[in-house]
Image: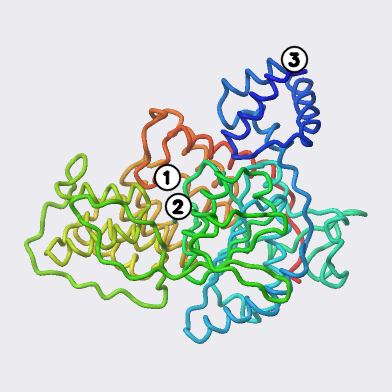
């Protein structure tokens, strides 16, 4: 057993690595998890286990066992009927009608802290019932968690009868097939609609097109903040706000009490007992001072329906290849992109373009900012302009692949990723995205091979070396994420079958 000092160290470790706060009444559960870990891993005592945690990587089996033990989420389909009715009867129908009227049939939804996946599959069922032309829509349904065992179960999509305690039998029988006397398997048609990925709300950077957490219409982060202290809650809320489009909706759980400061940038609404937050629109502001003005907040805007119409100044074409290191005069833009201040970066990029900069690099920067702002069509045109000026610009090909994925043009995305890897076989982000795309397209073996390639590259690189196309991430963190992705997809592999409801 750990003494008081040891338990304090363990709680500090959990908070530092996950943002989770262990409360006094939860310590008995933690003690059982520690005892089980000692038995499972053949460790002499709890102190040895704690030392292994503190000295080991963030994705070690010992760490994963602890995370799984302290994040056991009790979930079921259509949990919180008041919120589900609000989505079914009010919010989703209104959004769908607006999108139909605009001719832009896309919806982007994220279940943050998705546990075993019941919440995200519930949303997929709601959309199936609300969209008779579902196949004509570009639906982005993402679920993330830090518990890789739970993510593996979500990928399998197999649930016990207890998960259906708020689900009518006819709904269960329509969207699931019986798999044994007490279990049901999600329809393959719905399972293909969703994506699950590892993401640590406390440690990882978002929003980002790389993790597909940008320009979202709806985020559900329900009963997650009960684990976090107020400082972590405030930081996560700021990132969730930036992940939403203006007017986008955030649903929290009934137990997720927020300090007023954490709601900055949101409007609070109540409708029929369902409380929800919507992201406020950004006020118009003058451009930041390119000489290094104080950083501004990092809003995200979206303009998917408007095609790009950038001007192309008639100037002498510069050298095609960007010189090593930051290009002269680009330092402030690179700083903004590195901080994921997409809107402010775009202001500076447009300023340079108006001044006559028509280089491949400035178009690449523009593509990256636009893609992360959710302005996919404009980002695609910026990629094309960059590639026209420098066909060997691997970063433009990579951004182009991410935009193709966002537009659900998966064969084109795969071709763009392979072009990226032709230009640079050690491009770890491209190997990662190719692996996830192959898994999404049903080629699991090929996808796992690509993820292992990415992991091999990340492990051989200098741990603290930063990734060019993943702001705030180094190779050590990328390697940890890749190990988690591999574990969850290997754990989540199950036999195929089922039927379309």
Q: Position of residue 342 (x, y in %)?
A: 35, 58
Q: Is residue 130 above or below residue 160?
A: below
Tag shown at residue 210: 2
Q: In front here: 88 or 13?
A: 13
Can residue 121 be seen here?
A: yes
- Residue farthest top in this picture: 44
Circles 2 and 1: CB atoms closer than 8 Å: yes
Please tell me in which quadrant of the rendered image residue 355 appears: bottom left
Comes first in the chain, label 2 or label 1: 2
**Residue lying at 19% horizontally and 73% vertically, measured from the top left:** 311
Q: Which residue is mark 3?
A: 45
Dot in front, 2 or 1: 2
Relative to the observer, which residue lies in front, 465 or 440? 465
Q: Residue at the spot x=66%, y=72% of the render?
A: 270
The secondary structure type at the circle numbered 3 is loop
Q: CA distance from mark 3 to mark 1?
A: 40 Å
Percent across and percent down for residue 58 are 57, 31
Location of residue 405 with respect to 482 vertically, above or below: below
**Residue 345 x/y as whole percent:** 29, 57
Q: Quadrant of residue 55?
A: top right
Residue indicated by mark 1: 429
Q: Is the residue marked by circle 3 packed among few (<14), some (14-19), or many (20+) residues within 10 Å?
A: some
């Amino acid at each position: 057993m750990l003494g008081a000092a040891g338990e304090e160290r363990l709680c500090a470790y959990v908070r530092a690595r996950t943002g989770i706060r262990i409360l006094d009444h939860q310590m008995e559960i933690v003690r059982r998890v520690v005892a089980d870990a000692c038995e499972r891993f053949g460790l002499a005592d709890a102190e040895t286990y704690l030392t292994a945690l503190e000295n080991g990587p963030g994705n070690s089996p010992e760490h994963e066992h602890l995370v799984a033990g302290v994040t056991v989420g009790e979930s079921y389909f259509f949990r919180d009927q008041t919120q589900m009715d609000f989505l079914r009867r009010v919010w989703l129908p209104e959004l769908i009608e607006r999108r139909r009227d605009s001719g832009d049939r896309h919806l982007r939804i994220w279940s943050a802290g998705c546990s075993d996946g019941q919440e995200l599959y519930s949303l997929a069922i709601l959309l199936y019932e609300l969209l008779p032309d579902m196949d004509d829509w570009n639906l982005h349904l993402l679920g993330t968690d830090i518990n890789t065992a739970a993510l593996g179960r979500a990928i399998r999509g197999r649930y016990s009868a207890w998960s259906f305690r708020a689900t009518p039998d006819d709904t269960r029988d329509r969207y699931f097939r019986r798999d044994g006397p007490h279990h049901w398997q999600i329809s393959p048609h719905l399972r293909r609609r969703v994506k699950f990925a590892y993401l640590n709300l406390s440690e990882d950077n978002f929003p980002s097109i790389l993790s597909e957490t940008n320009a979202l219409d709806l985020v559900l982060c329900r009963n997650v903040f009960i684990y976090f202290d107020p400082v972590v809650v405030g930081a996560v809320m700021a990132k969730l706000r930036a992940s939403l489009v203006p007017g986008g909706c955030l649903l929290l759980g009934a137990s997720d009490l927020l300090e007023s400061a954490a709601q900055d940038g949101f409007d609070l609404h109540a409708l029929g007992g369902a409380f929800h937050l919507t992201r406020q629109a950004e006020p118009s502001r003058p451009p930041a001072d390119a000489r290094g003005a104080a950083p501004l907040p990092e809003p995200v805007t979206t303009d998917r329906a408007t095609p790009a119409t950038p001007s192309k100044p008639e100037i002498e074409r510069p050298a095609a290849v960007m010189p090593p290191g930051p290009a002269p005069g680009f330092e402030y833009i690179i700083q903004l992109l590195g901080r994921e201040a997409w809107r402010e970066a775009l202001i500076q990029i447009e300023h340079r373009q108006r001044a006559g900069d028509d280089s491949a690099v400035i178009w690449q920067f523009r593509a990256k900012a636009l893609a992360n702002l959710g302005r996919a069509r404009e980002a695609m045109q910026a990629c094309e302009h960059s590639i026209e000026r420098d066909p060997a610009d691997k970063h433009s090909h990579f951004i182009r692949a991410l935009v193709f994925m966002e537009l659900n043009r998966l064969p084109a995305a795969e071709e763009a990723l392979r072009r990226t890897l032709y230009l640079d076989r050690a491009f770890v982000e491209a190997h990662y995205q190719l692996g996830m795309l192959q898994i999404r397209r049903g080629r699991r073996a090929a996808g796992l091979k690509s993820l292992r390639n990415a992991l091999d590259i990340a492990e051989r690189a200098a741990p603290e070396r930063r990734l060019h196309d993943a702001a705030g991430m180094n190779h050590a963190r990328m390697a940890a994420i890749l190990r988690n992705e591999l574990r969850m997809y290997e754990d989540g592999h199950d036999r195929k079958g089922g039927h379309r409801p």
